[in-house]
Image (cartoon, grey):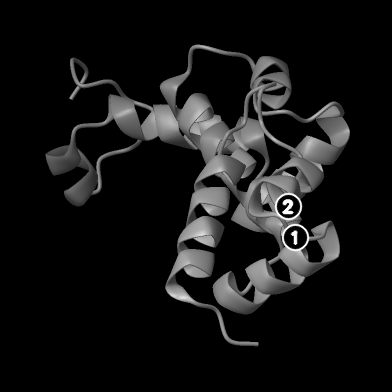
Amino acid sequence: MLLRNEGFRRLCRARERLQQVDECAPTIEELARELRISPFHFIRQFEMVFGVTPHQYRIQARLDRARQLLAAGQLSVTDVCMEVGFSSLGSFSSLFARRFGESPSAFRRRVHASDLTPGCLSLMGAPRDRSFREA
């Protein structure tokens, strides 16, 4: 299946729109309609070009956004889950753990613990639970 330049550009625009994680995010059917092709054909072309289905791509975009929000530390894990479009905290947590090797809570603790230790002390092997003033 050979894509012309315009078809490739349209798929790239659709990929950008799939990165939206808010309630205005378009469905697969809406994106296919914009491209003027069937949803099945859109999924098949998207996977051929980008190596993942549109659904897989959207899930990865949501998880990446969740990592950013967890690292910022402003929202609870439940709030992050809802913010990025998951409706179940359990499924969000298990998917996050499968993709990144640790739970959302563990990720947040690790990121915030590393923020408290100056880099030079971590290179010297200083314990992570001490603050800078104690060192």
Image quadrant containing the N terminus: bottom right
- Residue nearest the observer in this picture, 99 or 40: 40
Q: Vertically, is 106 above or below 15?
A: above
Amino acid residing under circle 1: Ile
Instruction: Mark 1 or mark 2: name the one nearer the start of the chain.
Output: 2
- Residue nearest the observer in this picture, 48 or 95: 48
Note whether residue 101 is visible: no
Amino acid residing under circle 2: Ala
Report, in whole angstroms, how far the alpha carbon at label 1 lies from the one at label 2: 5 Å
- Residue nearest the observer in this picture, 97 or 2: 2
Note whether residue 21 is visible: yes
Q: Residue furthest bottom?
A: 1
Determine which residue is flagged by label 2. 32
Counting other residues with Cα less than 10 Å from the Cα at mark 2, is it few (<14), some (14-19), or many (20 or more)?
A: some
Residue at left offset 62%, top offset 39%: 62
- Residue nearest the observer in this picture, 61 or 7: 7
Image quadrant containing the C terminus: top left
Q: Residue furthest left?
A: 120
Counting other residues with Cα less than 10 Å from the Cα at mark 1, is it few (<14), some (14-19), or many (20 or more)?
A: few
Q: Secondary structure at mark 1?
A: loop
Determine which residue is flagged by label 1. 37
Check residue 133 in the rendering and tell me which mark sits there, or answer none: none
**Residue 77 x/y as whole percent:** 67, 22
**Residue 61 x/y as whole percent:** 58, 45
Decide if residue 65 is on the left or right side of residue 124: right
**Residue 88 x/y as whole percent:** 87, 29
Q: Vertically, is 103 above or below 38?
A: above
Residue at left offset 35%, top offset 35%: 114
